[in-house]
Image (cartoon, rainbow, N blue to C red):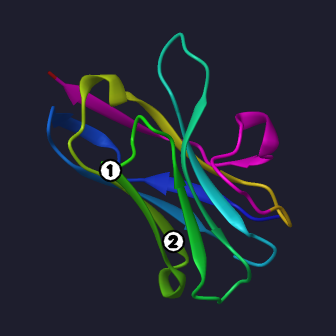
């Protein structure tokens, strides 16, 4: 079973940037890596996703929710077996635990709902101070 491990979280001032990493044990049967976040007392919400049509294809589709569009960017480095979530212009309400997630043999068109994914990383905390 594919395993996901996030890293790169931390504390920044509003307006700052962070890059989160999601180490993927194997991209076999992984067609979509999505990113979610959960703030205290709130439901886990999807923020971005990267979909491909094959393991080593260069064709990708990237999806973002409106609240992060233009500020967050997803990318992949196959050689490093890692997906990234680059975050710019961070705001205090971006503060949350961030997770990467996937469902084997399942692609995505848009950012998936949390109930649509089955494999999660352990999360990494992002705190944005005002």
Q: Where is residue 7 drawn, in percent x and y?
A: 42, 53
- 72 versus 92 height, above or below: below
> Residue drawn at (79%, 56%), measured in percent from left and top?
103
Magenta-drawn segment: 107-129
> Residue drawn at (50%, 88%), measured in percent from left and top?
79
Give left or right: position of 11 versus 15.
right
Residue under circle 2?
Answer: 82
- Pick whichever of labels 1 and 2 is earlier in the sequence: 1
Q: Residue furthest right?
A: 105
Q: Where is residue 17 drawn, in percent x and y?
A: 21, 49
Identify the mark at residue 80; answer none if there is no mark.
Answer: none
Q: Where is residue 73 drawn, in percent x and y?
A: 39, 58
Q: Quadrant of residue 28?
A: bottom right
Q: Quadrant of residue 44?
A: top right
State which quarter of the image contains the N terminus: bottom right
State which quarter of the image contains the C terminus: top left
Identify the mark at residue 70; answer none if there is no mark.
Answer: 1
Q: Is residue 123 magenta?
A: yes
User: Which-is-in-front pick, marks 1 and 2?
Assistant: 1
- 45 versus 50 height, above or below: above
Q: Is residue 10 magenta?
A: no
> Residue drawn at (83%, 61%), measured in percent from left and top?
106
> Residue drawn at (53%, 10%), measured in percent from left and top?
41
């Amino acid at each position: 079973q594919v395993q996901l491990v996030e890293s790169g979280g931390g504390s920044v001032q509003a307006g700052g940037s962070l890059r989160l990493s999601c180490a993927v044990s194997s991209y076999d049967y992984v067609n979509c890596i999505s990113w979610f976040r959960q703030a205290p007392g709130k439901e886990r919400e999807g923020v971005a996703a990267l979909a491909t049509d094959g393991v080593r294809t260069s064709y990708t589709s990237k999806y973002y929710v409106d609240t992060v569009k233009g500020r967050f960017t997803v990318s992949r480095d196959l050689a490093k077996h890692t997906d990234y979530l680059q975050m710019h212009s961070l705001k205090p309400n971006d503060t949350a635990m961030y997770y990467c997630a996937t469902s084997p043999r399942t692609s995505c068109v848009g950012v998936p709902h949390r109930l649509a994914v089955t494999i999660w990383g352990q999360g990494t905390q992002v705190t944005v101070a005002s």
